């Protein structure tokens, strides 16, 4: 992402909307400026801000007059008055930032779509998490902190050492140079992203062991971690296996995503429309 | 992605936060996915959602790329549900957000009767989802629990801010903007409804709950 200095009027609206806090108004240039090392190419500024197309010289003059008179004015907080944001041409490895940060684009760079996979959301169709399985989603950088792949690799190493299998369709797995050791590609390690998810599946009996590993590695990370644990319910919709383990470990379960079992496999008779992702 | 799952709040606080979403599985080459998803959204509209969205194009409140100079005085602050339905052009995850249990329960029951054959999930408190299933005479198939946020949590701002910002699990709503909107409401520069609308426009898949956000912003005014 870049900000056109000829258009920017330094109104400062964009400094608030950047989830990584990577935009600031440079006191010398008097223009909004992006810290490219911290920017995760999420496009929240470009996509989220509404745009006016006012004349920059006119807006700067008005702002100077108002400032001189100490008059506070009330601009809309979600508007870039001069449409100063311009999309950058991203190349490898920077392009992985956008793949893991902007949910509105398909993610060709990682070979799979989205930050994670469908996990149990389509479990009624795929049967991916079976009775007796615990599916883990270990997400890094969320909410609003971000993470570098170097940090994620620490967790991958620890999990690989515990001999877990990584979800094949997950974009982090795809970026591993050695899946058996959990080692990620060297050239992406310093790239920062909004968030990324490691997905594994283990027998339910290993739930406690996996969480202990996660707790241990978390202490070494300079970011936040959000864990999700999924499982298949019993015949009558009951779930009396995983929840008790989690509660015994001190978790107060408040919220869940519940698949209500309405999906079914359909035999295609025609070429389906191309599916675009971004998951909920 | 676990976008709807990790919201800040305890189970009780999700009484006005029900996200019901339909998702076409990649492994299920369903040529009828698009009309089914459109039908899902149309039915949702009958139960007065507070937001609708598809993961590709966004929710019922979106940013505009061509605001005129007079737009500040007559800006449309109402959600455009029909635009979401009309704009659905490719099969992707579609979501409906409700701010009360009754609407969510009736919608889930109706979706079961409609028998679209698509995977449907409810994201809310565990008990809230169970009640929806009971109302519709459905058994839960699978469940994904949120264990909340761990690690360097000292980097996360206070719960008023994160209650707002985590309503976009993709992270498109910054903590700074959420804090700014709280401050705007405290200073009486914007109403909670207006502030919630600004935040909604940044959510890229329509799962932000403007009704819950309005409540949170109203509470934040005096707390």
Image (cartoon, coloured by chain):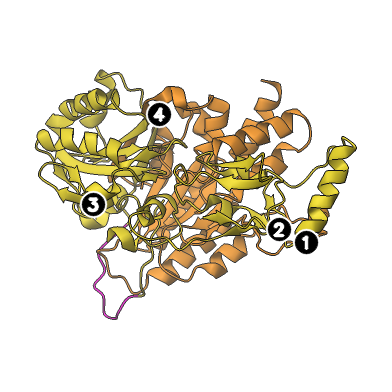
Instruction: Check disc 1: other Cα within 10 Å, few if <14, some if 14-19, many if 20+.
Output: few
Which chain is assigned yellow?
A
Q: Are marks 3 and 1 in contact (CB under 8 Å)?
A: no
Instruction: Check disc 4: other Cα within 10 Å, few if <14, some if 14-19, many if 20+.
Output: many
Both marks 2 and 1 on one chain: yes
Both marks 3 and 2 on one chain: yes
Q: Nearer the viewer, mark 3 or mark 4?
A: 3
Q: Which mark is residue A128?
A: none
Which chain is assigned orange?
B
Expressed as whole percent of the image width and height from the top left, the position of residue B17 reads: 52, 39
In front of the other: A1 or A108: A1
Q: Which residue is mark 1?
A: A55
Return the chain for callout 2.
Answer: A
Q: Quadrant of residue B194?
A: top right
Sequence order check, earlier mark of 3 and 1: 1
Q: Which residue is mark 2?
A: A82
Helix, strand or loop for disc 1: loop
Q: Are marks 2 and 1 in contact (CB under 8 Å)?
A: yes
Return the chain for callout 1.
Answer: A
| C-alpha span from label 3 to label 4 | 33 Å
Sequence order check, earlier mark of 3 and 4: 3
Q: Which mark is residue A175?
A: 3
Q: Nearer the viewer, mark 2 or mark 4?
A: 2
Both marks 3 and 1 on one chain: yes
Q: Which mark is residue A254?
A: 4
Expressed as whole percent of the image width and height from the top left, the position of residue B43 reads: 52, 60
Q: Quadrant of residue A165?
A: top left
* Magenta stretch bounds: A263-272
Helix, strand or loop for disc 3: loop
Q: Nearer the viewer, mark 3 or mark 2?
A: 2
């Amino acid at each position: 992402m870049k900000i056109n200095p000829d258009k920017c009027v330094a109104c400062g609206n964009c400094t608030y909307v950047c989830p990584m806090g990577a935009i600031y108004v440079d006191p010398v240039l008097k223009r909004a400026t992006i810290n490219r090392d911290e920017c995760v190419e999420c496009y929240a500024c470009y996509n989220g801000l509404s745009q006016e197309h006012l004349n920059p010289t006119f807006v700067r003059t008005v702002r100077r007059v108002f400032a001189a008179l100490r008059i506070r004015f009330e601009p809309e907080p979600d508007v870039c008055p001069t449409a100063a944001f311009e999309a950058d041409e991203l190349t490898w490895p920077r392009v992985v930032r956008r793949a893991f940060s902007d949910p509105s684009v398909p993610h060709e760079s990682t070979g799979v779509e989205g930050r994670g996979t469908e996990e149990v959301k389509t479990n009624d169709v795929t049967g991916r998490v079976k009775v007796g399985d615990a599916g883990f989603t270990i997400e890094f950088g969320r909410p609003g902190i971000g993470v570098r792949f170097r940090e994620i690799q620490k967790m991958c190493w620890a999990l690989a050492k515990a001999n877990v299998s990584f979800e094949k369709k997950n974009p982090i797995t795809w970026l591993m140079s050695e899946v058996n050791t959990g080692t990620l590609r060297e050239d992406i390690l310093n790239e920062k992203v909004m968030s990324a998810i490691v997905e594994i599946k283990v027998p339910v009996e290993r739930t406690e062991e996996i969480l202990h590993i996660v707790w241990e590695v978390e202490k070494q990370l300079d970011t936040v971690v959000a864990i999700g644990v999924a499982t298949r319910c019993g015949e009558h919709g009951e779930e009396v296996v995983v929840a008790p383990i989690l509660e015994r470990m001190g978790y107060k379960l408040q919220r869940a995503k519940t698949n209500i079992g309405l999906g079914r496999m359909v035999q295609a008779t025609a070429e389906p429309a191309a599916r675009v992702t971004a998951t909920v | 992605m676990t976008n709807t799952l990790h919201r800040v709040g305890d189970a009780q606080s999700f009484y006005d936060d029900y996200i019901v979403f339909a998702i076409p599985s990649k492994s299920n080459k369903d040529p009828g996915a698009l009309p089914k998803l459109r039908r899902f959204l149309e039915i949702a509209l009958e139960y007065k959602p507070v937001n609708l969205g598809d993961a590709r194009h966004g929710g019922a409140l979106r940013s505009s790329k061509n605001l005129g100079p007079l737009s500040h005085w007559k800006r449309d602050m109402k959600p455009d549900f029909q635009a979401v339905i009309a704009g659905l052009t490719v099969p992707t995850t579609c979501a409906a957000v409700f701010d009360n249990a009754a609407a969510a329960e009736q919608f889930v029951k109706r979706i079961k009767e409609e028998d679209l054959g698509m995977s449907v999930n409810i994201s809310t408190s565990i008990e809230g989802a169970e009640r929806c299933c009971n109302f519709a005479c459905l058994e839960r198939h699978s469940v994904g629990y949120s264990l909340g946020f761990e690690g360097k949590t000292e980097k996360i701002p206070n719960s008023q801010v994160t209650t707002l910002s985590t309503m976009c699990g993709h992270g498109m709503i910054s903590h700074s903007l959420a804090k700014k909107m709280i401050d705007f409401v405290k200073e009486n520069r914007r109403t909670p409804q207006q502030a919630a609308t600004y935040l909604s426009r940044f959510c890229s898949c329509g799962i932000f709950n403007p009704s819950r956000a309005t409540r949170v912003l109203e509470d934040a005014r005096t707390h």
